[in-house]
Each structure stands twice: as structure tokens, then as C-alpha cells.
Image: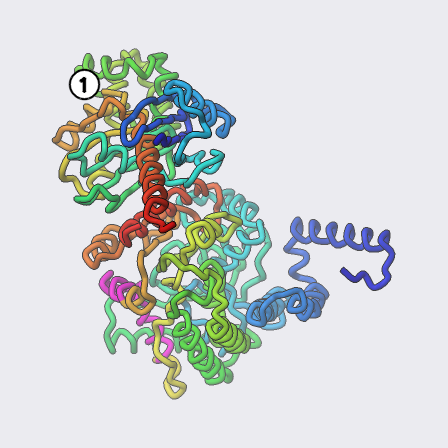
Amino acid sequence: MFVAGVDVGSTTTKAVLLSDRNCVARHAMPTGVDLAAAADECLRIVCGAAGVGHDNLAALVATGYGRDRVTGVARTVTEITCHARGARALVPSARVVVDVGGQDSKVIRLDDDGMVADFVMNDKCAAGTGRFLEVMAARLNVPLEEFGMRWRKAKEAARISSTCTVFAESEVISLLSRGVVPEPIIKGLCDAVADRLAGMVHRVGLGGGVVMTGGVSRNDGVRRSLEERLSCRVTVPEEAQFAGAYGAALIAFEMASYVLSSQVRRPK
Amino acid sequence: MMHLGIPSRLRRTARRAAGRAARWAVARPEVLLRRRWAYQVASAALPLLELRGAKAYQVAAIRCVLSDFADAYLGRRPCIFTSAFVPTELVYGLGGVPFLPEAAAGLAAASDLAARSLSACEALWYSPDLCSFHRAGLGGAAAGLLPRPSAVIVTSHLCDGGKRSLFHISRLAGCPFYMLGVPYVPSDRATRWLASQIEQVAGDLARRVPGLSLEGLAQALRRSNEALAEYERVSALRRNVPAPWRGSEALNYVLLFLWSWGSPGLSPFYRALRLHLERTIAAGDFPIREERHRLLWLNLRPYYDTGVFKYLEGDCASSVAFEEYSFAYWPSLDLRDPFASLAEKMMSNFGWGPIERRLEAIARLVDEYSIDGVVQFAQWGCRQSNGGAAILATELKEKGIPFLNLDGDGVDARCGSEAQAITRLGAFIELLGARRGG
């Protein structure tokens, strides 16, 4: 039985195809402006990679801010529930999930059964999100992929506002104009994001394994800054970017299994 | 549809004229609100509203607001601006008409008029960090959208922004400003001290403002008690599962709840609402038939057009079963001792004083209304409710009640994101669903 989950995020659309509970294909691509087309294309690619017809999916669950634009879904589920399910499946010891996406960040507290016990999300500003880092990377002319390496080279961190993306960008320009090299600025930016995330973690309660998911989890600088603030290890699974889509696929699998078992039990 | 033999060309012309009039009214509300004929036309159109499907309580509410607006804008009675928790019985009792700029801000947001008021306030050097209800109220006064006050009364309790913005309004209008100092900790002595202030303010207003006197105070208190008795029946009916009334609509009438105690129109409104709820329950014709979850809503709501409640009540089949600001927390007023009674009403506000009072009130509402989860609408710039969010969350968590702090803004649509609010509410509903095992 094949099921799929698709996570239409503000920056990236991700799809995961499961055969029973096992991941057989996954794909990520820029969301662009046509959310429905991005979801369709992403699903077409994962189905094509596994040689499965789109119509042969037993269930499809969509999540992410563009979830309502996806056609042919069995259900839409919020990112919070999907990231919780995905992260728990990827890292069974997970109790706190820190998901930082393009336009928002969320911290989810899991109960012993892996269900969402509590969650908080970033407030009105983009500071503390992937978009914040994208803006700064563009200003510094440093690819986001290099942030982790540059973070490690930095001897100290520049002090940067974590309140507002526009203020922070002004501060970065000011630092560059004073001749400050990018490394301490990058460390300061990662610290600013981690400051916001650590506050959110403490709101839901630190305890148990901390897992980071979402696009920003690939930024090793933010992970290290967060570890410093929480004084604990922050695990980033290899499939961290796909946690939401994976969680959606797992929910699709449960739905399809339930339907199947109902049909089996139904007297003829 | 019947057209009574009116030629289609004439109908099109009439429709175009009506459209032009509506656009003109939206563009120049300050002119329309000061025209006697506008109220005459609106009053004459009320029966048509019922014919077009409006409920009797909705028409009663509009009648109540129209009457006060006509009195205030046409200068038929002295208009007294007040902050939200001044007992309006005092103003009606003096023969005046109360006007609450912060409640009017909610109406402005609902009518898509808030942007102009907010801009006018920003031009007066006020930071967008101040609560938008107060900013839009002050901006509305500065832009000439509000009636001219004869006096301003504020209280020291709850909203700090309210007393400062209303002080500014009194300076713009050049009218007397009164502040009732509400002691933080309730006691008999504190109530007596507050009662003496109310009496002093009432006496001073009766002397200084032509048209005001203390003669009608007993009648205003009697009307308030009548309305309270009806309202308590309404509140009792709302305990029904499923909820007999949409919380999104109930949150609209919070503005009337703050504004109209002591007015002749409030008791008929609550009576009509009670009858409506009784009929709804008897017929089983609930707005959400398969009610999945019952929420308690703290603080106000976004009053501008938003899809948040359509999502909550429609897609999530979840009710706002009751609202913090719909809780009538005070006892019946004592006509023999009106000032002490009004003071007691103010002192019994559970939002004032130690936070334990608010926590107790919320716990009581959670029990009485069979609440599954509590949502606090974290109004941008609201210190009095947001300040206690952490303690509230902890307290509710200990009782096993999930809590969501939902960031947003009731008046300034620029300060909130509908998509993000929907995601947060959706996740909260999923959390409630998971607790029920599915």
C-alpha cells in the first residue's frame, strides 16, 4: 500500500512516499507562486521515482501553509501535528520538537505517546525564522549552506537585534560598514534566532530529547547556538527537512489502514 | 423574486443610486452620522431587516445602538465619553448618553473605517505599540469621526492606555475630565472611598453640564437590574451543549455589554436574545450541530473581516461557548444606595486586582460552560490581559485544560496574520481532538 504526505511550505514544498511505513521516495523543490502546481509536481516526482501511479495512492495528506491548495487529499493537517508525528518517528526519544521554517518557527512539546501536548509559535515578526536568515545571507553575500562553517570560525558573536528583521538588517549593514568580517555577524545572527527559539522551548518546558526539523535545521550554526542556550544536545535527523511531509504520510498511512481494516471487518 | 411591476431600468438606476449613497456614506461617515434624516431612514428600515431574515434580537441591538448614536451625534443629550469599565448607569442616570471610543473602534473596524482613525492617531505621535482600540478611539476623535463630548470619565482600573487616550480626547474637546481611582485590593473601605468619588463626579457633572441631573439615577439602576436578570438567563442558556449561539456573534455584542447598562434598550435586547436561545434549544436548531469542542474565549476578537471564525466554527466544528468579556460578574444594584452599588460593581471586576481573581473567574467559566480549551486573544499592546498569560497557562495546565495564546489585533488588521492565526487554531483543535483519542 502506497501513501504520501506533502508539505507545502512558504519556501519549499516537500513530498514523501511511503510503502506501508517505509519511506521509498522523497523530494523537495521551491514552492514558487503556484502552490497547487508545486505540490502536484513534487508528488509526481516521488511517485515517478517509485514507479507508482499518482492514482494508486491509498491516501494523501497535505500540510504546510499551502495545504488547502493541494487537490485530491484525504485530509489536511496542520504543520504542528505533522512535524510532531514525523520528528517522533525519525527520533523516537524526541520530547521537544523545534521546527523552523521559512515564515514561522514553532516549538512542540510531545507527551509520552508522541502526541502534541503543547506548542508555541513565533509572534508577529519574521525574526527567528528562515526568512530572517535568508535576508541576512543575501545582505552578507554568503550562502546559507556556509553559515555552519563560518559559525565555527567565529571567535566571538556580534550583537544583533532579535526583535525585528528590518532592524537586524540595518545592524548588519552598520557592522559591515565598520569593517566587521562576516563570521562574527553570522554567529550573532544564529544567536539571535537561537535566543528566540530557546525562549519558546522554555515556554513549553525543556526535558527529554530535543529535535530540530524544518529547513533551518540544515543550518548548523543555529543548531549550535541553540545547544549553547539550552545546555543540551539538539538532534537534527538526516531527513529533518522532510519531517512535516513524513508526519503527513504517516497520518495518511493510518487513515488508509483504518479504512482497509474496516473493509476487512465488514460482514459480507 | 417579485419586483412589483417596477421597470428593470428603474430598478438598475435605484440600485446604482443606493450603491453611490453607500460609497458616499463610507467615505464621509462623519457627515452622515450628524444627519437627522440618516437615523430616520435607518429606524424606518429596521422592520425591513426582520423581513429579510434578521433575528429580533439583532434588530433590538441595532435599535439600541441607533438610539444612542442619534442622541450623541445629534446632540439630543449631553454626550459623556467613558472608558470601558465606567458604570454606564451613571451616565444614563444623569440624563446623558455614554460614548465609548474603544468600543466605537470595534465598530469602525467592522465597518472598514479603522484605518483612517489609526492614521489620525499616528499623526498625533502615538506609537503603534499602544492598543489599537485606544488608538482608533483617539484617532477617531481627532479626525472628527466621533461626537463632541460634554465630559470624559475614566477609571484607573484595567486599561492604562484608555485613560491616557481619553485624557487627550478631553483636551481636544476642551471638556472636563474625571478619573475614578479604583483601589487595587477590595475592601468595604475601598468601596466606600470609590462610592464617594462617583457621587462627587455625579454631583459635579450635574452642576457643570447643562441638561444633566441626578433625577434619573434610580431609573437607570432599575433598568440595569432588569437587563441583568434577563442576561443571567441568557448566560444560563448558553451552558447548553451544543452551544445555542455562535461565539463569533456573541463577541460582537460584547460592545453592547460594555456600553449599555442602564439604557432603555438593553433589557429588550437581552429578552429577545433569551427567547431566540430558548427557541433554538427547543427546536434543536444549533448553529454547530456536531459540536466537536467547546472553547472559552478570553479578551476580545478581531472586529474586521476575518476568516478565523469561519474556520473555527465551520471547518473545525468548534464553538466559542462563552467569552470572558460576556461574564456579568457583579451583583444586582441596590437602588437605596446607588453610588455604593456602582462602586461595588466596579470593584467586583475580576480583571482588576490580584491575578487570582481572574484565574478564579476563568476556572468557574470553564466548569460552568463545559469548556475543553481556553483561547486568549493576545491583543497587540494589551498589557492587562497579556501580562498574566504565563500564570494563566500554568494554572490551566495544572487543571488539565489546554490553553492557546493567540496573537492578533482586534482593530488594526496590519498587526495580525489570518493564515498564521488559522494554523495556530487548527493545531489547537487537533490537540484537543488527540486528547479525546481521535
Task: Name the one closer to the observer, B413 or A41.
Answer: A41
User: What's the residue at 43%, 62% (across, down)?
Assistant: B83
Residue wearing tag 1: A156
Question: What is the x, y in percent for residue A266?
Answer: 36, 49
Residue type marked 1: Glu
- Magenta stretch in the rendered image: B341-363
Question: Is residue A122 among what the camera can see?
Answer: no
Question: What is the x, y in percent for residue A180?
Answer: 27, 13
Judging from the image, mark 1 belongs to the subunit labelled A
| Above/below status of A144 relative to B194 | above
Question: What is the x, y in percent for residue A224?
Answer: 19, 23
Question: Is residue B426 among what the camera can see?
Answer: yes
User: What's the residue at 34%, 31% (across, down)?
Assistant: A1
Q: Is residue B65 left or right of residue B154?
A: right
| Crowd around label 1: few <14 · some 14–19 · many ≥20 (10 Å) | few
Residue A54: image quadrant is top left
> Outermost residue toward the bottom?
B336
Task: Name the one closer to the observer, B354 or B340.
Answer: B354
